[in-house]
């Protein structure tokens, strides 16, 4: 299912509408007598259309088969097939809620599969139609100057018709001449980043309940803050989290504004997005309307990316703040001579409960953070490589500045989180050391045995695994970022920059 979702996100709605519009023009041209002059030509196109319909039906049956089989497997196991988050009711309360949840999920996945079906089949069907028109064009070229009864002017008109036919097909297939290499790489680096964000958003939708549960546990941990020192630590962490969010917001907004300024200076829209309503080249008014529309859309997109890129950092920062509170609690174990042994034991149990709550938060967010960072690791090398090529070979001053800001934004998507993961591992080691250094020598047997078990548990570091393959750490981040230089090496060895120019 994820592979289908991934494919659907590599194609924007604007491009889809553009292709549909162009395909309509092609089908319209197919019906004109001056294009399809013989019954043989019409039969070729009709056969291509019939084959395209057959292809669509085959794909439709395969996608529907998967959807139905997953639905049946879920119902047979007495659970919803995809276990989506539902804020309206809990499917575990009875058979009616279970079937309601299953039906809602089936309808949602069926609609999604329909969209994916269209996106997965449109290139095959369109290319099949294009090849049919190329076959028709071949027949027209083979028949040039084969009729001795035609005049030279008539033969020339047939040649002109063949040329216009070929130009129409090429215009439908590719219009890449509107892009300079720098503009193309700028759009490509942004689309690659949006591709990863789309995957992260979809995955987040399926695990949204984990975020809500984590927030509830954090509320419980806040209730365990007994001293003003503990509260100040958490308040400072929350304030720092707000500051981190604002720093990211300013960086993302700065890139967006810099790209808009670069576009305005160059008298073109910043991202050259498809607009089916008007052509921005027709005048200043339409140009500014296009710029405002693209800027509004990009602000909304940047806001979504901002949330997806900062939630991991903010959660982990809050976890570390609670680890600091736990360290203070461990330091204070058996330091008050007025407390009885039972009270000291209760404080130790409180530390254990506090630690278990932190571990529970980490376990809840582990799959979400693992997938989020894994997708980012997969894309960071490619995106940074495209950006470096754009900066070094194709960008002007303003485009170069916006690309540098984009480069920095991509780096901060993973670097701070990886750094915090390393610090969290160190926090676990510090907990074990603090327990060993606490005042336990003259404690009772029950206290010592509990302390030993607790020490064994805290010695296990909290490690997040990216996609279940490699640990999330600064070392891993540096390794995947080095792929950008591999992309640069390929470009230099193949001299692709000179060819693009």
Image: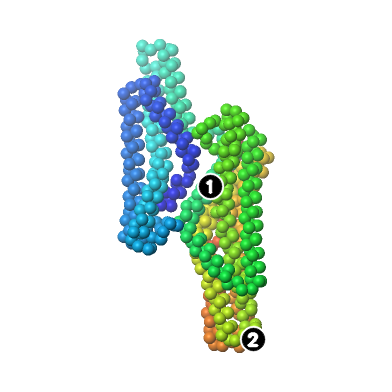
Specify the quadrant of the image occupied by residue 139: top left
Q: Which residue is mark 1?
A: 194
Q: Residue at x 62, y 55 (%)?
A: 245
Task: Measuring from the top left, give residue 265's x and y in whole percent.
Answer: 66, 35
Q: Is residue 10 above or below residue 362?
A: above
Specify the quadrant of the image occupied by residue 452: bottom right
Looking at the image, how many numbered discs can be counted on the residues? 2
Task: Measuring from the top left, give residue 130's x and y in whole percent.
Answer: 41, 32
Which residue is at the front of the view, 219 or 163?
Answer: 219
Whether residue 381 can be seen here:
no
Specify the quadrant of the image occupied by residue 347: bottom right
Task: Measuring from the top left, give residue 324's x and y in whole percent.
Answer: 62, 70
Q: Secondary structure at mark 1?
A: helix
**Residue 320 shown left or right of residue 108 in the figure:** right
Q: Residue at x 37, y 31 (%)?
A: 132
Could you classify mark 1 by the number of other residues whose Cα lies within 10 Å: few (under 14), some (14-19), or many (20 or more)?
Answer: some
**Distance Cα–Cα, label 1 vs label 2:** 60 Å
Q: Residue at x 63, y 69 (%)?
A: 231
Which residue is at the front of the view, 103 or 301?
Answer: 103
Q: Residue at x 65, y 50 (%)?
A: 250
Q: Quadrant of the C terminus?
A: top right
Q: Is residue 191 above or below residue 220?
A: above
Task: Measuring from the top left, give residue 39's x and y in whole percent.
Answer: 31, 23
**Residue 454 shown left or right of residue 3 in the figure:** right
Q: Is residue 325 above or below residue 470?
A: below
Of circles 1 and 2, which is in front? 2
Q: Which residue is mark 2?
A: 338
Whether residue 389 can be seen here:
yes
**Mark toward the start of the polypeptide (1 vs 2):** 1
Could you classify mark 2 by the number of other residues whose Cα lies within 10 Å: few (under 14), some (14-19), or many (20 or more)?
Answer: few
């Amino acid at each position: 299912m994820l592979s289908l979702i991934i494919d659907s996100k590599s194609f924007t709605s604007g491009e889809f509408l553009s292709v549909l519009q162009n395909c309509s023009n092609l089908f319209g041209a197919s019906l004109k007598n001056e294009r399809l002059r013989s019954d043989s030509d019409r039969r070729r196109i009709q056969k291509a259309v019939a084959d395209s319909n057959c292809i669509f039906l085959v794909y439709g049956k395969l996608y529907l088969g998967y959807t139905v089989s997953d639905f049946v497997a879920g119902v047979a196991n007495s659970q919803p097939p995809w276990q989506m988050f539902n804020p309206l009711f809990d499917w575990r309360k009875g058979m009616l809620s279970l079937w309601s949840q299953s039906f809602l999920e089936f309808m949602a996945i069926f609609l999604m599969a329909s969209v994916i079906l269209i996106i997965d089949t449109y290139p095959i069907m369109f290319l099949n139609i294009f090849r049919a028109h190329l076959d028709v064009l071949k027949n027209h070229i083979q028949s040039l100057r084969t009729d001795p009864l035609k005049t030279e002017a008539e033969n020339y008109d047939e040649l002109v018709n063949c040329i216009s036919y070929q130009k129409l097909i090429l215009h439908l297939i590719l219009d890449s001449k509107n892009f300079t290499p720098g503009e193309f790489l700028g759009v490509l680096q942004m689309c690659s980043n949006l591709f990863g964000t789309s995957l992260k958003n979809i995955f987040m939708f399926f695990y949204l309940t984990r975020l809500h549960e984590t927030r509830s546990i954090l509320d419980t941990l806040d209730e365990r803050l007994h001293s003003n020192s503990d509260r100040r630590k958490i308040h400072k962490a929350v304030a720092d989290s707000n500051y981190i969010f604002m720093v990211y917001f300013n960086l993302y907004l700065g890139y967006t504004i810099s790209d808009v300024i670069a576009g305005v200076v160059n008298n073109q829209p910043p991202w050259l997005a498809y607009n089916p309503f008007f052509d921005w080249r027709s005048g200043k008014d339409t140009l500014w309307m296009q710029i405002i529309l693209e800027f509004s859309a990009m602000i909304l997109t940047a806001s979504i990316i901002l949330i997806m890129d900062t939630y991991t950092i903010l959660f982990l920062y809050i976890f570390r703040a609670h680890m600091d509170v736990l360290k203070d609690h461990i330091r204070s174990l058996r330091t008050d001579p007025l407390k009885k042994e039972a009270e000291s034991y209760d404080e130790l149990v409180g530390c254990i409960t506090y630690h278990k709550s932190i571990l529970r938060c980490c376990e809840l967010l582990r799959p979400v953070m693992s997938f989020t960072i894994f997708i980012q690791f997969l894309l960071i090398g490619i995106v940074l490589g495209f950006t470096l090529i754009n900066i070094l070979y194709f960008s002007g001053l303003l485009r170069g500045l916006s690309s540098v800001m984009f480069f920095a934004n991509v780096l901060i998507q993973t670097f701070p989180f990886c750094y915090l993961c390393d610090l969290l591992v160190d926090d676990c080691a510090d907990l074990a050391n603090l327990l060993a250094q606490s005042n336990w020598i003259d404690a009772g047997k029950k206290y010592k045995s509990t302390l030993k078990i607790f020490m064994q548990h805290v010695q296990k570091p909290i490690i997040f695994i990216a996609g279940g393959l490699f640990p999330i750490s600064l070392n891993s981040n540096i390794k995947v970022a080095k792929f950008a230089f591999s992309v640069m090496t390929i470009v230099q060895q193949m001299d692709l920059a000179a060819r693009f120019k």
